[in-house]
Amino acid sequence: MGIFSNKNQLLKEGQYWAEMLNMDWAQTKAGDDMLVVEFFLPNKGKTGKALFPQVNGFFKSEAQRACEILLGVADPENLDAFFMLVGKAKGSHFVLEVTNHQKISGEITQNFLVRPVVTPWTDTAFLESTNRRSELTDARSKRCNRKGEDKAFAPSWIEQEGV
């Protein structure tokens, strides 16, 4: 069984804590508008994208729900307002709901749907990943400070006095 098999699913059906990395308004190959929500799953250490092509009522309503949850507005008035809201909302937390859908052809696809966080964000894996990011940032700034201190030179009188 290879990675292109129908039985190979990226995620099991269920709900996952997620962090929004970015949102975009793109076009499908057919030229239809599409909302794209890029996310990070701390428990899985994976990133992914939820796609909402504006081809039917289901995806349109799910795109509006995603905007309402992540941006606070279900239908931004224009693309400038949309991208301004996206800039402010990066890093927002939500619940990613994964559902399987069987097409008429028999092929099973997965829907990634945006849902609100009902309980407070207490996911330890997320907190650990955030702590790791903070530790890396702290270590990086300490290294930079040390390099700056190493470049500083002592006055010549220190060597003469034996200090």
Image: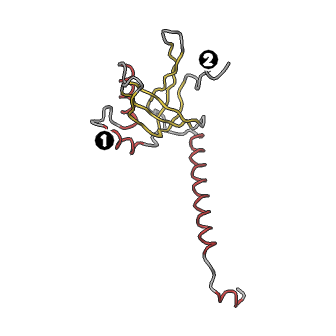
Give how far across and how far down residue 120 sits, in percent: 49, 38
Q: Quadrant of residue 115?
A: top left
Give how far across and how far down residue 55 sits, in percent: 37, 20
> Which residue shows up at 60% across the image and 34% down it?
44
Say which amino acid is labelled 2. Answer: Lys
Tell me the distance, in whole angstroms, between the alpha carbons under discs 1 and 2. 41 Å
Give how far across and how far down residue 151 sits, in percent: 61, 73
Per the rendering, the mark at residue 7 is 2
Q: Vertically, is 23 above or below 152?
A: above
Labels 1 & 2 near each other (Cβ < 8 A): no
Q: Which residue is mark 1?
A: 80
Q: How many marks?
A: 2
> Which residue shows up at 70% across the image and 90% down it?
161
> Which residue shows up at 48% across the image and 35% down it?
38
Badge 2: residue crowd in 10 Å (few <14, some 14–19, many ≥20):
few
Q: Secondary structure at mark 2?
A: loop
> Which residue shows up at 31% across the image and 41% down it?
80
Say which amino acid is labelled 1. Answer: Asp
Q: Secondary structure at mark 1?
A: helix
Q: Is residue 94 left or right of residue 72?
A: right
Q: Vertically, is 79 above or below 115?
A: below
